Amino acid sequence: MGLVEPVVVLIRGINVGGRGRLPMADLRALATDLGYGDVATYVQSGNLVCTTDRSADDVADAVRAALDAAMDVSPDVMVRTGAELRGIVERNPYAEHTDDPTRVHVAFMPGRASAQVPDVDLAALAPDECVAIGRELYLHLPNGLGRSKLAEVVAGPKGPRPTVRNWRTVTALLALADERA
């Protein structure tokens, strides 16, 4: 047994566009059944915060397997510790734009590989911008996520498939993790 710490579980494609329906009460029950403590969810898009002594990789594998068994789907599951999420917030290269937290996003990449800026002509996608730091891709989307060609490229079929959260959600998840630290 290791140190019990907060983790943030981000599930890709849950409750988006009518697909992958998962009530948050069911997600909380699933996490509790897996033995995680102090379980909470945030909004309806697959955000879970809990405490555990398991590694982030073990949590991702366990949640993915439990969702597969419960829903007959295997969504991508990304997990960051509370400390990792704090670092993500502290390294935000677009902090000056967070007065509108719906215009700054973080793409959480699966696995342990470093994030990569998409191999596209970024100037052609302006005013959208992105920066890769660690396992995350930070996006500044002045016209919003729904109108962003860059966001389409990031979430597209080429390469690893991240899950994207806006800045409001990222900071709310950090606050939930901090409450559990």
Image (cartoon, grey):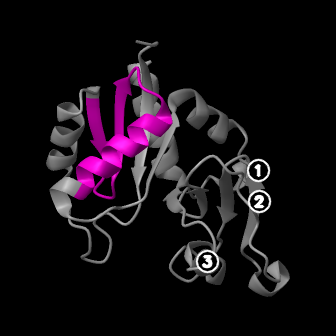
Q: Which residues are magenta?
A: 39-68
Please report the residue visible at 37 percent of the width from the left and 66 percent of the height from the top: 13
For residue 143, which numbered disc appears in the image? Answer: 3
Location of residue 100 in the rendering, given as x and y in whole percent from the top left corner: 57, 58
Q: Secondary structure at mark 1?
A: loop
Residue 138, by quadrant, is bottom right
The residue pinned by badge 1 equals: 93
Q: Nearer the viewer, mark 2 or mark 1?
A: 2
Q: Indicate the quadrant containing the C terminus: top left, top right, bottom left or bottom right.
A: top left
Judging depth in this view, the residue of 127 and 76 nearest the camera is 76
User: Marks 3/2: CA distance?
Assistant: 17 Å
Q: What's under tag 3, amino acid-wise?
A: Asn
Please report the residue visible at 54 percent of the width from the left and 62 percent of the height from the top: 162
Q: What's under tag 2, amino acid-wise?
A: Val
Q: Is residue 68 left or right of residue 113?
A: left
Q: Does 103 appear in magenta? A: no
Location of residue 5 in the rendering, given as x and y in whole percent from the top left corner: 44, 20
For residue 161, which numbered disc appears in the image? Answer: none
Location of residue 61 in the rendering, given as x and y in whole percent from the top left corner: 39, 44
Q: Is residue 66 left or right of residue 47?
A: left
Q: Is residue 12 above or below residue 4?
A: below
Judging depth in this view, the residue of 73 and 39 nearest the camera is 73
Q: Sequence-wise, which precedes: disc 3 or disc 2?
A: 2
User: Marks 3/1: CA distance?
Assistant: 18 Å
Q: Contact (CB < 8 A) between labels 3 and 2?
A: no
Q: Contact (CB < 8 A) between labels 2 and 1?
A: yes
Please report the residue visible at 15 percent of the width from the left and 46 percent of the height from the top: 25
Q: Contact (CB < 8 A) between labels 3 and 1?
A: no
The residue pinned by badge 2 equals: 131
Label 3 crowd bin: few (<14), some (14–19), many (20+), radius 10 Å: few
